[in-house]
Amino acid sequence: MIPIDDSPIVRDGKSLILAMDHGLEHGPVDFEDVPEKLDPSTVFETATHDAVTTMAVQKGIAEGYYPSYEDDVNLLLKLNGTSNLWMGEPDSAVNCSVDYAAELGADALGFTVYGGSNHEIEMVEEFRDAQEKGREYDLPMVMWSYPRGQGLKNDTKPGTISYATRLALELGADIAKVKYPGSKDAMAHAVQCAGDMNVVMSGGSKTSDYEFLSTVEAVIDAGATGLAVGRNVWQREDPTRLLDALEKVIYEEETADAALEQTE
Ligand SMILES: O=P(O)(O)OC[C@H]1O[C@](O)(COP(=O)(O)O)[C@@H](O)[C@@H]1O
């Protein structure tokens, strides 16, 4: 773990990572209700909001669109990723080198590790190479720490999420991105297992404003340092309004109710 409070992807100790790698991970299905968002520029525009500390994309999106936004958006280059067409045990191809991510202007790196998969050993070794190379550029490493595989029937169980944050700490991540384990207490334990490393919650599929903000409130109360979110922001008709509210809950530690009231 390196000190990351001065990193551009951290604001007052917190982070809001806007993720838009879904075209690879899930396919065009996530854009069915918002076809205009198939144009990555629309999501880069959303990422210019002050609440967003960085935007996470794959190499092709960074190459094609980041040059127009490099003054206004911090780039998190997701180094690996897999399509939903892959039917084997969870695995993720390394799609971009750290050198090339740095050349593209990355401020941070992202890497998925599916602990518990039959491919865990190779993924962890690939993570090792990326993490150590990233240190040469002072690039913080965000681990998408997603225990998943044949042996894991429930990948959001409290014990599993606590294992996910601990695994990220021990392998040298600077931020662990994990699923919500279902309660504030379980999240607090996952944060405790991470030591001094930052922990952010993964957004998940779109829910109501109140439901989403209440979960974020619980996560911040539990000591997590923010969010890595995609669909719950850019699938909304008015992402700016939700980001205004998220800004209040994450950085000002306001309640979901207060944040919603102020952004109506
Ligand atoms: O593997 P899963 O659970 O389907 O989700 C993967 C997606 O979730 C994210 O980690 C976060 O995005 P969401 O907030 O939309 O869930 C993306 O980076 C990624 O594409």
Image (spheres, rainbow, N blue to C red):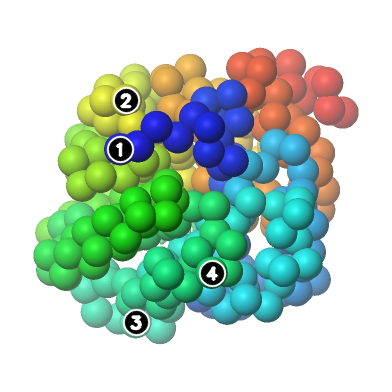
Q: Do residues under tags 2 and 1 come within 8 Å of each other at their CB atoms?
A: yes
| Mark 2 crowd level (few <14, some 14–19, many ≥20, 10 Å Cα) | few
Nearer to the camera, 215 or 8 = 8
Count of all numbered marks drawn on residues in the image: 4
Q: Earlier in the sequence, mark 2 or mark 3?
A: 3
Mark drawn on residue 1? 1
Residue under the point 49% across and 67% down: 101
* Label 2, label 1: how far apart the Cα atoms are: 9 Å
Question: In the figure, 254 relative to 121: above or below?
Answer: above
* Label 2, label 3: how far apart the Cα atoms are: 35 Å
Residue under the point 81% across and 20% down: 261
Name the image quarter holding the C terminus. Answer: top right
Quadrant for residue 255, please give it.
Answer: top right
Quadrant for residue 258, please give it.
Answer: top right
Mark drawn on residue 86? 3
Residue at label 2?
A: 196
Q: Amino acid at mark 4?
A: Glu
Q: Do residues under tags 1 and 3 come within 8 Å of each other at their CB atoms?
A: no
Give the foreground label among 4 and 3: 4
Q: Earlier in the sequence, mark 1 or mark 4?
A: 1
Give the foreground label among 2 and 4: 4
Return the residue found at the far front.
Answer: 136
